[in-house]
Amino acid sequence: MENKAIAIGSDHGGFELKQEIIKHLTKKGIGFEDFGCFSEASCDYTDYGKAVAEAVAAGKYEKGILICGTGIGISITANKIKGIRCALCSDCFSAKATREHNDANILALGGRVVGVGLALKIVDTFLNTPFSNEERHIRRISKIES
């Protein structure tokens, strides 16, 4: 199987925004795998949050994107997986800061919270911002993981 850069998943509340993000990633030539869900039929965010987080934690994907109605439940689920630092972001400043300072490896979005235009800017910011590698941030991350 090809090692793709981004794992993406959503529940029904994030399905519509996920489809827009998938179009955006495709247009930019960014590889991804869609872990579901695949319709607006009611489903459990936990299933998709866990699947994406486990794939990222296993190193199969560089980063992940998760979307549910608010982004809260799916981010809590992802953060239960060892090695995951999932950040719920509703603005570009937070997306940039969480990459630079926390080396977040999964972005969570609220499909009922942010509009498509802003969400795509947040995705671009998250994907294009490198970790700072500053000693203070490395130290803090190691405290999170211990």
Image (spheres, helix red, strand yellow):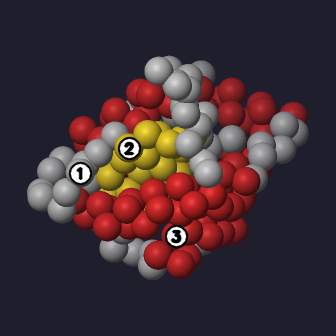
Q: Amino acid at mark 1?
A: Phe
Q: Position of residue 2 (x, y in %)?
A: 52, 25
Q: Secondary structure at mark 1?
A: loop
What is the quadrant of residue 110 in the picture?
A: bottom left
The answer for how far apart the CA atoms under marks 1 and 3 are is: 20 Å
The answer for how far apart the CA atoms under marks 2 and 1 are is: 9 Å
Q: Are marks 2 and 1 in contact (CB under 8 Å)?
A: yes
Please tell me which residue is depicted at 72% across the width and 36% down the height of the picture.
Answer: 140
- Position above or below: 12 against 121: above
Q: Secondary structure at mark 2?
A: strand
Q: Residues within 10 Å of mark 1 (few under 14, many from 20)?
A: some
Q: Residue 34: which disc? A: 2
The answer for how far apart the CA atoms under marks 3 and 2 are is: 17 Å
Please tell me which residue is depicted at 48% across the width and 49% down the height of the picture.
Answer: 65
What is the quadrant of residue 25 in the picture?
A: bottom right
Q: Are marks 3 and 2 in contact (CB under 8 Å)?
A: no
Residue, disc 1: 38
Residue, disc 3: 119
Q: Residues within 10 Å of mark 3 (few under 14, many from 20)?
A: many
**The residue positioned farthest toward the left in the image shown:** 42
Mark positioned earlier in the residue sequence (3 or 2): 2
Q: Position of residue 122 (x, y in %)?
A: 60, 66
Q: Amino acid at mark 3?
A: Ala
Q: Residue 144: which disc? A: none
Mark positioned earlier in the residue sequence (1 or 3): 1
Q: Position of residue 141 (x, y in %)?
A: 68, 34
Q: Amino acid at mark 2?
A: Asp
Look at discs 1 and 3 and give the one toward the viewer.
Answer: 1
Position of 93 compared to 64: left or right? right
